[in-house]
Amino acid sequence: RENFVSFIAEGIQEQTKDCGTILVLNDRLHRLKIENAERWCRYIYKGNSNSIELTSDKFDGVVYRIDPNRKSGDMYIQLAASRLKSGGTLWIVGANDEGIKSTAKHLSPWFKDSDTIDFRRRCRIIQATRTEAPAKGTIKDWSTTIQVDDTRKSWMTFPGLFAGGGADNGTALLLEALS
């Protein structure tokens, strides 16, 4: 799937050349070839390092590699909105089986004029324009504190982690093994 998404994302390269400052969100594998872009992903993957916060800069364009988890996706959409200048362009890249077709429904009120600008090999690029609606601008805005078990203090979690905000069976087993 990543190869197909990378293939279709090549269409964004030409559009971003004259766009100004670009932010690439959630491209864990660095497959989106956008030159001179700042990159941010909340996960550390294959040796890349990242801070937990985005810069405070406003960008002319954001390229977002879709996160298939709906709650994480909502977070990324608002983080993108908070970093885009009003009237700036958002490009969302992803595969149909990751939920890209329904993503446009979740862009309002932060984006308008969303449209699929390319569709090939069961992958899409959606383009939208930033409105002036306020958005949650830091990852900390998305934190939730949960009580995992009776013996530990509360833990901070974020969308897409801890099986929907609670300890899953694997985490419970790990906690049981750690005395």
Image: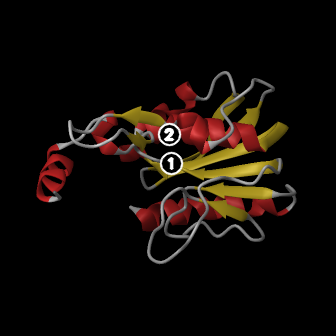
Q: Residues within 10 Å of mark 2 (few under 14, many from 20)?
A: many
The residue at which mark 1 appears reads as 66
Tell me the residue at 75%/23% (across/down): 133
Q: Would residue 98 appear left or right of 111 to someone viewing this image?
A: left
Q: Residues within 10 Å of mark 1 (few under 14, many from 20)?
A: many
Q: Position of residue 80 (x, y in %)?
A: 67, 43
- The x and y percentages for residue 69 are 40, 41
Which residue is label 2 attached to?
Answer: 73
Percent x, y of residue 23: 72, 56
Q: Could you say which quadrant of the image residue 141 lies in?
A: top right
Helix, strand or loop for disc 1: loop
Q: Amino acid at mark 1?
A: Ile
- Are the residues tagged 2 and 1 within 8 Å (C-beta)? yes
Q: Is residue 126 visible?
A: no
Query: Image check: 32 left or right of 129?
Result: left
Residue at 85% from the left image edge and 55% from the top image edge = 19
